[in-house]
Amino acid sequence: MKHEKIYVIDGIPIDEFYRQNADPITLLQNGDYDILNEQGF
């Protein structure tokens, strides 16, 4: 049985932290268009 390590920043999982704090340019550079659309850009 493998254990998956969950990385946390300030008590928030990394994926959620990225969604909350990434600026539009970073999202465009990484190709995260779905998150960009959620934020209204």
Image (tube, helix red, strand yellow):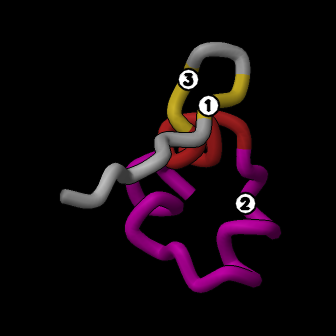
Position of residue 35 in the picture relative to residue 41 (left or right): left
Task: Please name the amino acid that badge 1 sits on.
Answer: Val
Crowding near pointer 2: few (<14 within 10 Å), some, many (20+)? some
**Disc 2: which residue:** 24
Kind of residue at disc 2: Pro
Q: Residue furthest front?
A: 1
Q: Nearer the viewer, mark 3 or mark 2?
A: 3
Of helix, strand and loop, which one carries label 2?
helix
The residue at the point 81 percent across, 68 percent down is 25
Front one among 3 and 7: 3
Q: Is residue 23 magenta?
A: yes
At a point 78% along the width and 67% down the height, the residue shown is 26
Furthest-top residue in view?
11
Q: Earlier in the sequence, mark 3 or mark 2?
A: 3
Q: Residue at 55%, 23% (x, y): give it.
A: 12
From the top left corner, tell me how far across and down residue 33 is, in percent: 48, 75
- Residue 14 in the image: state x and y as whole percent: 59, 42
Name which of mark 1 and mark 2 comes first in the sequence: 1
> In what quadrant of the picture does the C terminus appear?
bottom right
Residue 17 falls in which quadrant of the image? top right
Tally the numbered discs: 3
Instruction: Answer few, some or many: residues within 10 Å of disc 1's Cα (few below 14, many 20 plus, some between 14 and 19).
Output: few
Per the image, the residue denoted by label 1 is 8
> Which residue is depicted at the point 68% across and 78% down?
28
Vertical comparison of 28 with 23: above or below: below
| Magenta residues, dominant SS class | helix
| Spatial separation of the CA atoms under disc 1 and disc 3 | 5 Å
3 and 2 marks in contact (CB < 8 Å)? no
Magenta range:
22-41
Instruction: Identify the residue position indicated by label 3 in the image.
Output: 12
Residue 18 spot, x, y in % from top left = 63, 47
Q: Is residue 20 above or below residue 29?
A: above
